[in-house]
Image: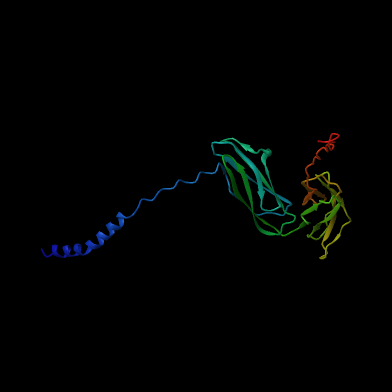
């Protein structure tokens, strides 16, 4: 009897707490479960490529593999890199992929104008299926000490008034010793010409070779991009590049003048 009495007192003391807890549970409304977001049609084997520290060379290449796991065809509409030093290209220029089909695109990096040290970039893959999608992929690399540069790496010509233009770029060798020689240079655009000028030195005494980039007057309307390919006699840098953008005059629609009708002659005497 003496043991039951303390237990009864404890239970009686806890009853108000149990009642309050039960009342709180009775007021809880069930939470509605939201549907998960649909999966992206394109799935990539790797979403980040890290080449880590690399030896000195003018270009590096990485690739990204993917598959269409959706139930509708997809079309890749654009590969948008975060840096002009990257050139992403779809394998075989293929842009459309059926369900279950795999593909690949390559990312080539030109290092001549990039500072040494670690670098992080991205490539946005824009594609369409049932809806528009964008997938961002990462590309990382650590470059060694600079040995060669092409500056500026990009030149722009805005020929809106139709006048000719020219700019100069420089290939600079920072390695010391015997400098390289530029043996040839040309552009893959018919409106851009390249001329190799006599070699000289920069303000720090590094040997460099200037090249004159020229665009004639009367370029076609619209925008076009091109690549200047510079060949040297150095086994480490056989070929380096510079980008060119040419903006021609805007395309104006052709207007049609309405035919002028003769002024009617009122009849004699009028009305």
Please state if 219 lies on the left or on the right of 55 as rendered: right
Asked if 26 appears above or below 67 in the picture, the reply is: below
Q: Is residue 96 visible?
A: yes
User: Residue 178: percent from the left, percent from the top?
Assistant: 83, 57
Count of numbered marks: 0
Which of these two is toward me, 67 or 156?
156
Which of these two is toward me, 128 or 170?
128
Which of these two is toward me, 161 or 153?
161
Please state if 16 lies on the left or on the right of 122 as rendered: left
User: Residue 29: percent from the left, percent from the top?
Assistant: 35, 52
Q: Is residue 50 visible?
A: no
Where does the C terminus fall, quadrant-wise? top right
Question: Residue extending furthest right?
Answer: 198
Question: Which residue sits at x=83%, y=60%?
Answer: 207
Question: Which residue sits at x=27%, y=60%?
Answer: 20
User: Residue 98: percent from the left, percent from the top?
Assistant: 59, 35
Question: Residue extending furthest top?
Answer: 267
Please state if 134 lies on the left or on the right of 203 as rendered: left
Query: How was this image coloured?
Result: rainbow
Please state if 257 lies on the left or on the right of 108 as rendered: right
Question: Which residue sits at x=70%, y=59%?
Answer: 116
User: Residue 34: percent from the left, percent from the top?
Assistant: 44, 47
Where does the N terminus fall, quadrant-wise? bottom left
């Amino acid at each position: 009897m003496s043991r039951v009495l303390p237990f009864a007192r404890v239970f009686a003391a806890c009853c108000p707490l149990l009642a309050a807890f039960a009342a709180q549970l009775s007021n809880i409304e069930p939470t509605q479960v939201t549907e998960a977001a649909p999966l992206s049609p394109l799935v990539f084997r790797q979403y980040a490529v890290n080449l880590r520290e690399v030896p000195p060379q003018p270009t590096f290449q990485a690739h990204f593999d993917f598959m269409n796991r959706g139930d509708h065809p997809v079309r890749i509409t654009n590969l948008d890199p975060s840096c002009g030093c990257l050139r992403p290209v779809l394998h075989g220029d293929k842009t459309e992929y059926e369900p279950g089909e795999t593909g690949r695109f390559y990312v080539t990096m030109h290092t001549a104008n990039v500072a040494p040290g670690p670098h992080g970039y991205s490539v946005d893959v824009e594609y369409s299926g049932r809806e528009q999608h964008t997938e961002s992929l990462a590309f990382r690399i650590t470059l060694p000490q600079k040995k060669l540069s092409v500056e500026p790496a990009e030149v722009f010509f805005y020929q809106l008034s139709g006048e000719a233009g020219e700019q100069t770029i420089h290939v600079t060798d920072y390695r010391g010793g015997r400098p390289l020689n530029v043996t040839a240079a040309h552009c893959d655009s018919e409106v851009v010409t390249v001329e190799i000028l006599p070699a000289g030195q920069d303000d720090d005494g590094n040997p460099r070779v200037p090249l004159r980039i020229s665009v004639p007057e009367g370029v076609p309307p619209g925008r076009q991009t091109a690549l200047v390919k510079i060949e040297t006699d150095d086994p480490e840098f056989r070929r380096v590049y510079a980008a060119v953008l040419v903006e021609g005059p805007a395309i104006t629609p052709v207007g049609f003048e309405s035919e002028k009708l003769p002024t009617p002659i009122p009849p004699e005497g009028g009305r």
